[in-house]
Image (tube, rainbow, N blue to C red):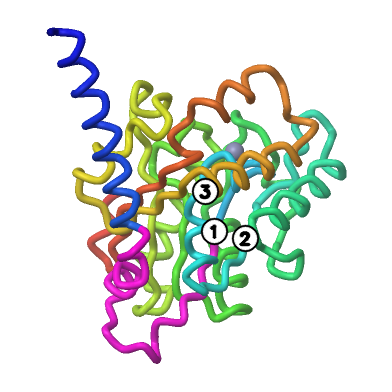
């Protein structure tokens, strides 16, 4: 009897995940309008900028978002603030990043890679907030960006370079250097257990409040995995485990970064 109960609970849970996924697919365009604070079709032309620190961040952490935005006809740009030169592989990692972006649907013309001596790929280096801010603003104005997506204050993996980008975007939000109608979003960092239960984590992400939620199914997962495989220099054994079990290969949730002087208090 108890075996039947276990089977019933497991099947019900899987059915719930499928229901959430199907509902998400149907309502994505409406949700995007809600995120952009507009009800008009004319102004829902989303021009998104994903800001990352290293080649491979885009597929390890942001793949569901990039794929879903592209599916909703948003124009997605990527700003990567370093070449990932920690092991002197910068030139190779630059090529890998462009290959990965092509798999995710971002052409090379929409990828900006910064190679600045003061923005090294190094967890012990303190990246300058003003340097990051100016790179983000320059990219935003060049492409008339109206949505910026980046890490939150915990940086998903806790990497100092990820956290520095969040500080810089919050700084921009507080100083009014970005247009008021631009939506700033930070990728929610989840705890270790939630991080490594793959798509089984979906109901919790769905239930918890977020500004934007992006979910991909098996096809999206295959593309995210294919993008990760482009980063040949990074394919150590634990990367395969990450690809197999990380919830970020299927699900991204974002919180809004409020604009205005009240944000100043964090500095
Ligand atoms: Zn990174």
Q: Is residue 226 left or right of residue 202?
A: right
Name which residue lies at 12% across and 8% down. 1
Q: Residues within 10 Å of mark 3 (few under 14, many from 20)?
A: many
Q: Which element type, helix, strand or loop, lies under badge 2?
A: strand
Name which residue lies at 76% across and 64% down. 108
Q: Can you give x and y, in whole percent of width and height, for residue 185 in the image?
A: 38, 58
Please tell me which residue lies in front, 248 or 127. 248
Kindly report the distance in space between the C-alpha atoms of the residues bearing marks 1 and 2: 5 Å
Q: Which mark is residue 259?
A: none
The residue at the far left in this view is 1
Residue that numbered label 2 is attached to: 78
Whether pointer 1 and pointer 2 mark residues with C-beta atoms closer than 8 Å, the reply is yes
Q: Can you give x and y, in whole percent of width and height, for residue 73 in the image?
A: 52, 74
Please tell me which residue lies in front, 57 or 196. 196
The residue at the far top in this view is 2
Q: Which mark is residue 62?
A: 3
Name which residue lies at 30% across and 65% down. 27
Q: Earlier in the sequence, mark 1 or mark 3?
A: 1
Name the quadrant containing residue 50: bottom right
Question: Would residue 175 be counted in the magenta stretch?
Answer: no
Q: Quadrant of ligand 1?
A: top right
Q: Residues within 10 Å of mark 2 (few under 14, many from 20)?
A: many
The residue at the far bottom in this view is 42
Q: Which element type, helix, strand or loop, lies under badge 3?
A: loop
Q: Residues within 10 Å of mark 1 (few under 14, many from 20)?
A: many
Q: Is residue 103 above or below residue 199?
A: below
Q: Which mark is residue 50?
A: 1
Identify the magenta region. 25-49
Q: Is residue 115 left or right of residue 191?
A: right
Name the quadrant containing residue 24: bottom left
């Amino acid at each position: 009897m108890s075996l039947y109960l276990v089977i019933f609970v497991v099947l019900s849970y899987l059915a719930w995940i499928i229901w959430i996924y199907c509902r998400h697919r149907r309502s994505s365009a409406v949700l995007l309008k809600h995120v952009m604070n507009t009800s008009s079709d004319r102004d829902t032309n989303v021009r998104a900028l994903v800001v990352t620190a290293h080649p491979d961040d885009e597929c390890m952490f942001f793949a569901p978002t990039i794929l879903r935005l592209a599916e909703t006809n948003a124009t997605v740009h990527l700003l990567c603030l370093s070449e990932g030169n920690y092991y002197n592989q910068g030139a190779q990692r630059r090529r890998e990043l462009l290959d990965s972006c092509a798999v995710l649907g971002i052409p090379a013309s929409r990828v900006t890679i910064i190679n600045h001596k003061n923005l090294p790929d190094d967890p012990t280096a303190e990246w300058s907030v003003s340097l990051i801010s100016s790179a983000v603003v320059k990219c935003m104005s060049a492409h008339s960006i109206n949505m910026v997506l980046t890490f939150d204050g915990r940086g998903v993996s806790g990497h100092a370079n990820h956290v520095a980008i969040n500080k810089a975007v919050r700084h921009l939000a507080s100083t009014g250097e970005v247009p008021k109608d631009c939506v700033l979003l930070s990728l929610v960092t989840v705890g270790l257990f939630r991080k490594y239960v793959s798509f089984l984590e979906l109901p919790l992400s769905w239930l918890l409040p977020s500004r934007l939620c992006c979910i991909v199914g098996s096809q999206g997962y295959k593309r995210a995995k294919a993008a990760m495989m482009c980063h040949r220099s990074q394919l150590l054994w634990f990367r395969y485990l990450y690809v197999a079990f990380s919830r970020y290969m299927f699900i991204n949730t974002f919180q809004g970064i409020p604009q205005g002087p009240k944000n100043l208090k964090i500095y």
